[in-house]
Amino acid sequence: MAARRRPHSLLSRLLGGTFLAVSLGAGQAQAQLVIDPIREIAPPWNALRPFESTPLPVLSEPKTRDPVAPEDTPVATRVRPEYAPRGIRFGPWMYTPTLTAGAFYDSNVFSSSTNKQADFASRFSAGLSAQSLWERHSLDMRLIADTTNYRSNTSLNSTDIDFSANGRIDIDHSTQVLGRFQAAYLHDEIGSLTSPTGAIEPTPYGFLSGDVTLRKQFGRITTSGGARVDRYDYGSVRAADGATINQDARDGEVYTAHGRIDYAFSEKSAVFAAFENNWRELRGTPTTSLNSNGYRALAGVNLELSRLIRGEFAAGYLRQNFASAAIGDVSGPAYRATLTWRPTRQMDVHFKTEQVVTTTSDTSPTAALASSYQLGADYELRPNLILSPLLVYEKDKFQGMDRNDNVYAAELRLKHLINNWASSSVYYRYLQRDSSVAINSYDKHVIGFNASLRF
């Protein structure tokens, strides 16, 4: 499987939503394998993530198209002018500063099966995004600093700093060169599958990533191809017995080539094929290599069955060849499907399932077959009040060891858009991991709230 950009947790990325204000409030202590939220990425930016579903192309002439009313767009991303941030315009740039403060209660901060410790924590974030207003080309930049402080277990405190930039060069109306750059200082949270056993503090690491992709449209055919480089630099952490756990073996680079081709039969149906090929060159140890190479390839269909139902369905194969003899060659079928049903203009129901053969992180030699099922909804109680329930089931079958896990997760989130510059949200989350290796089983409850200012 191609490398992920950063090994975040399932809940922090799956449940986080589009806005930072929604995602703040819970620690990232629940990393699982399937990490993508249920969403569509609009062209041309879907070319950077070839397995994400994308809106069907518009083939008709502009004058023959029916205008899309705001109430016919997805609830979660619907433009509501009376609640949208206005931004600060300065020359050819639009700036949007954000400030977010939140607090949460976690019933099991170490994600432990035997030593459950509850704690309260606060979380603060400051961000600034800048978007170009040029007639051609575009450049979007974002800087976020996010800090979490626990009341009792101060070893869990962490601060993340993340800068990213997305750029587009328009060669002509159907050809674009896309670029992405990210530089960040992040943490693998305790209890995640990427955190070392026995650690009592999050694992810090530096992360650099760059991607360049060429996208070209030929009438009904859309193609893209690109390459990405991800670099990891891990720090050491303290263990419960006071020892230092060195993580230098996980340092290194992951190189990825990716591409996708779509053919649209109409504005309601298309077929596609997508692939990623990766090479992982990691430091490892004198006795254990962490190097591997592999690929993931999918082909499928994208259908709009009616104005109420649309989905994308794909199947394929995945293979990862590890230099470590303990794992060797891991391969198997892969599939991915998303479905959106809009029974009313106030509700979107989402379903997503995915199966991959992958490693538990980009920089770990432990492989697993992961199958995930997600069912969620966004319900507009009022134009400024959105209720979002979500249920998740995941089955993890580990390779090279006798371990099978079942993961159950649920969230209920209520978001309130107060006005153009303020919003708030409250949420409840539950996570349960049942593992055949008893020490890896745990459950936790998280309750939190946050408030956000956007200018």
Image (spheres, rainbow, N blue to C red):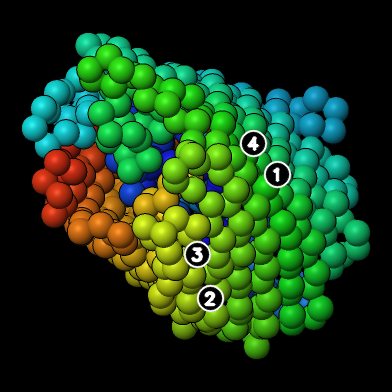
Q: CA distance from mark 3 to mark 1?
A: 24 Å
Give the camera-side residue of 402 and 423.
402
Q: CA distance from mark 1 to mark 4?
A: 7 Å
Horizontal side of residue 348 vs 94, given as left or right: left
The relative height of residue 215 versus residue 197 in the rendered view (above or below) is below
Mark 1 Cα within 10 Å, few/some/many (few <14, many 20+)? some
* Circle on res. 9: none
- Ranked by sequence position, the earlier of labels 3 and 2 is 2
- Ranked by sequence position, the earlier of labels 4 and 2 is 4
**Kind of residue at disc 1:** Gly
**Kind of residue at disc 4:** Leu
> Is residue 340 visible from the viewing direction of this image?
no
> Circles 1 and 2: CB distance less than 8 Å?
no
Mark 2 Cα within 10 Å, few/some/many (few <14, many 20+)? many
Give the camera-side residue of 9 and 26.
9
Identify residue for label 1: 210
Q: Residue at x 55, y 40 (%)?
A: 283
Question: What kind of element bears circle 1?
Answer: strand
Q: CA distance from mark 4 to mark 3?
A: 24 Å
- Ranked by sequence position, the earlier of labels 3 and 1 is 1
**Kind of residue at disc 2:** Leu
Horizontal side of residue 264 vs 313, given as left or right: right
Identify residue for label 3: 321
Q: Position of residue 434 (x, y in %)?
A: 14, 51
- Ranked by sequence position, the earlier of labels 4 and 3 is 4
The relative height of residue 412 versus residue 215 in the rendered view (above or below) is above
Q: Position of residue 376 (x, y in %)?
A: 31, 58
Q: CA distance from mark 4 to mark 2?
A: 27 Å
Question: Residue 455, located in which quarter of the rendered image?
Answer: top right
> Circles 1 and 4: CB distance less than 8 Å?
yes
Q: Residue at x 28, y 34 (%)?
A: 197
Question: What kind of element bears circle 3?
Answer: strand
